[in-house]
Image (spheres, rainbow, N blue to C red):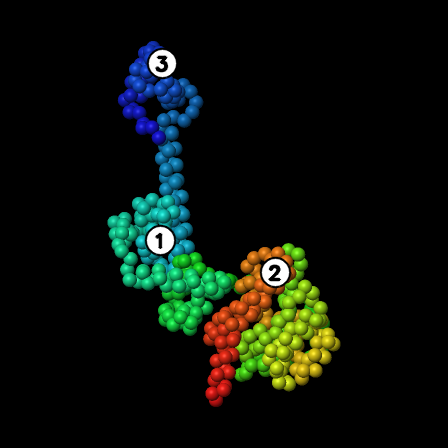
Amino acid sequence: MPAAKPPELRRRALELVASGEPVVHVARNLGISESCLRRWMGQDAVDAGQAEGLTSAEKRELVELRRKNRVLEMEVEILKRVSAYSARENVLPLIGFRLVHELVADGFPVAVTCRILGVSRSGYYGWRDRPPSVRETGDGELTMVLERIHYESRGNYGAPRVHAELRLARDRHVGKKRVARLMSLAGIAGISHRRKGGKPRPLPAPHDDLVKRQFTTDRPDRFWFTDITEHPTNTGKVYCCAVLDCFTRRVVGWSIADHIRTELVVDALEMARWQRRPEPGTIVHADRGSQYTSWLFGHRLREAGLLGSMGRVASSVDNGLMESFWSTMQRELLNRRDWESPAELGSAIFEWIEGFYNPRRRHSGLGFLSPIEFENQHTTVASAA
């Protein structure tokens, strides 16, 4: 932007024009452009009330008001950031120089930011130029570890499971609050829970409820829970039936298909029987869907000596263990992206169950062990006893 002309030069130019000197000569002699001089003449006519427009005083006032408005907008934005930062860090009201640094990096002036936050500029510059402390260096190194754990969990783990991974798998003993704070600062978050919609009312049950919402037991293969879920792809739906062991939370049987016929649940049950070889009397709890009330499914239960169990009509809580499992798979796998075909999604479900959930995913109900780790630990203790 060119430098403003001195007021004395402007006054002298206007006097010469008023005395009858040609505009071209005055502009050339004073070293200014003719357009600039004519602009001054127009503004002088407005100031004298001879033409319509904003006077010089009104323009100066408008410039000052715009400047003040920009400052107010910056102050409001800074206060919004302070509020968000306070909620994130759970500290009031001493935010510290870190927030000043973030705001300055986003283009806010240091002077305005420090004034709003009530900190000294010299203190901020001293903090900024000071070498990082041992604690800050440790936080930086730990943050990289947290990012790695979060990546290896496929972006699913929140602070509790990341902390469990540090403690159990890496023998790193740090506080839960420190892990949560560093994850928040780094923008690392787990997959949050989303409520599921309602389902149609199932058919009447041929079996009584033998579980009665008892989702705990003292050994594997005493209670099995089973259910069906579905998910769309660009070329059709995928249906998955799973059989979950109550004690270990392990998926002991599963079946994936592009249909929801009775064969879907029978195949999952047969896989569970083949893998576990359960003793007669194992309870298999399901909802009242037509696949589970079918003659074929009941016949396979009786043939294997298994006991059927069903909750009340339209009560998802009675099969809450499976609902919790589906919710986990929904947010950690199914809803993470769009799926092109049933074959693609079917392969992803298989890999998630057998490559991640059973052998690796840390379960809060199992002391943050994976289902297979928990089962192996139980088997070792039982064998020693």
Judge from the rendering whether residue 86 lies leftward or rightward of residue 8; answer left or right. Answer: right
Residue under numbered circle 3? 24
Kindly indicate the quadrant of the structure image that contains residue 136: bottom left
The reply to whether residue 313 is visible in this rendering is no
Q: Residue 316, percent across and down?
A: 62, 71
Task: Please name the residue shown 35% across and 62% down the image.
Answer: 141
Q: Residue furthest bottom?
A: 385
* Residue kind at label 2, given as amino acid type: Glu
Question: Badge 1 local density, few (<14 within 10 Å), some, or many (20+)?
Answer: some
Q: Distance between the residues labelled 2 and 1?
A: 45 Å
Q: Give the mark nearer the N terminus: 2 vs 1.
A: 1
The N terminus appears in which quarter of the rendering? top left
Count of numbered tags: 3
Task: Please name the residue shown 58% across and 81% down the image.
Answer: 221
Kindly indicate the quadrant of the structure image that contains residue 305: bottom right
Q: Distance between the residues labelled 3 and 1?
A: 56 Å
SS for callout 1:
helix
Question: Badge 2 local density, few (<14 within 10 Å), some, or many (20+)?
Answer: few
* Residue kind at label 1, given as amino acid type: Leu
SS for callout 3:
helix
Residue in front for this viewpoint, 49 or 271: 271
Q: Give the mark nearer the N terminus: 3 vs 1.
A: 3
Q: Which of marks 2 and 3 is in front?
A: 2
Residue under numbered circle 2? 344
Q: How far apart are marks 2 and 3 (CA)?
A: 79 Å
Residue contact at pointers 2 and 1, CB within 8 angstroms: no
Task: Please name the residue shown 27% across and 53% down the image.
Answer: 127
Residue under numbered circle 1? 99
Q: Residue 371, percent across and down?
A: 52, 75
Task: Please name the residue shown 60% across and 64% down the image.
Answer: 347
